[in-house]
């Protein structure tokens, strides 16, 4: 990507979590985050593309953010929150051990 101009360096991280239910149904939960790919890796947290991924509206890469900051923005965090919301809604009124 070294020759790709800045305006063409857009990127999207996507996460899809599937929950297989006992009745055979499958529920999916999609999370995504838009951003751009930087030119030089920055930061030491995370893995994969985190050192070069700048989420939209931020001037730091995922690798420069704390775990809490990244999780609040990340595609995985968004998908997991949707799964959590579904589980809470479907288990309301049932006894928990």
Image: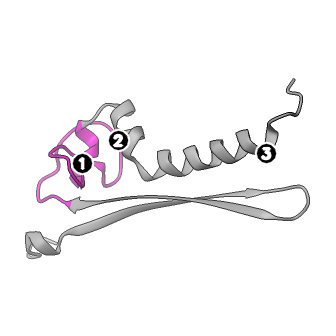
Residue at position x 69%, y 48% from top?
A: 86
First along the sequence among labels 1 and 2: 2
Mark 3: secondary structure? helix
Reply above or below: 83 against 69.
below
* Left or right of 58 on screen, residue 14: right
Residue beneath label 2, please? 46
Question: In the rendered structure, which segment of residues is drawn in magenta?
Answer: 37-64
Residue 95 versus residue 36 in the image, above or below: above
Q: CA distance from mark 3 to mark 1?
A: 37 Å
Mark 2, Cα crowd under 10 Å, few <14 / some 14-19 / many 20+, is some
Left or right: 3 as drawn, with respect to 44 = left
Q: Is residue 73 left or right of residue 60?
A: right
**Which residue has dot 3 on it?**
90
Residue in the image at 36% along x and 46% along y: 47
Question: How far, Cα to Cα, is label 1 from label 2?
Answer: 8 Å
Q: Is residue 68 left or right of residue 28?
A: left
Which residue position is annotated with label 1? Answer: 51
Looking at the picture, how far across and down is residue 46, in whole percent? 35, 41
Is the residue under label 2 in contact with that under label 1 (CB below 8 Å)? yes
- Res 96 quadrant in image: top right
Circle on res. 26: none
**Label 3: few (<14), some (14–19) or many (≥20) C-alpha neighbours in 10 Å:** few
Q: Determine the residue positioned at 22% across, 54% down.
A: 52
Q: Which residue is pictured at 44% across the width and 53% down the height?
A: 75
Query: Where residue 15 appears, x then y in whole percent?
Result: 50, 59
Q: Earlier in the sequence, mark 3 or mark 2?
A: 2
Q: Nearer the viewer, residue 81 or 46?
A: 81
Mark 3 in CB contact with mark 1 (< 8 angstroms): no
């Amino acid at each position: 990507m070294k020759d790709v101009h800045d305006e063409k360096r857009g990127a999207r991280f996507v996460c899809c979590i599937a929950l297989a239910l006992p009745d055979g149904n499958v529920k999916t939960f999609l999370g995504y985050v838009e951003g751009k790919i930087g030119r030089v890796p920055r930061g030491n947290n995370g893995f994969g593309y985190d050192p070069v991924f700048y989420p939209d509206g931020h001037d730091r890469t995922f690798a420069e953010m704390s775990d809490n900051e990244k999780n609040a923005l990340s595609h995985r965090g968004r998908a997991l929150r949707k799964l959590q919301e579904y589980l809470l809604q479907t288990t309301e009124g049932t006894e928990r051990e």
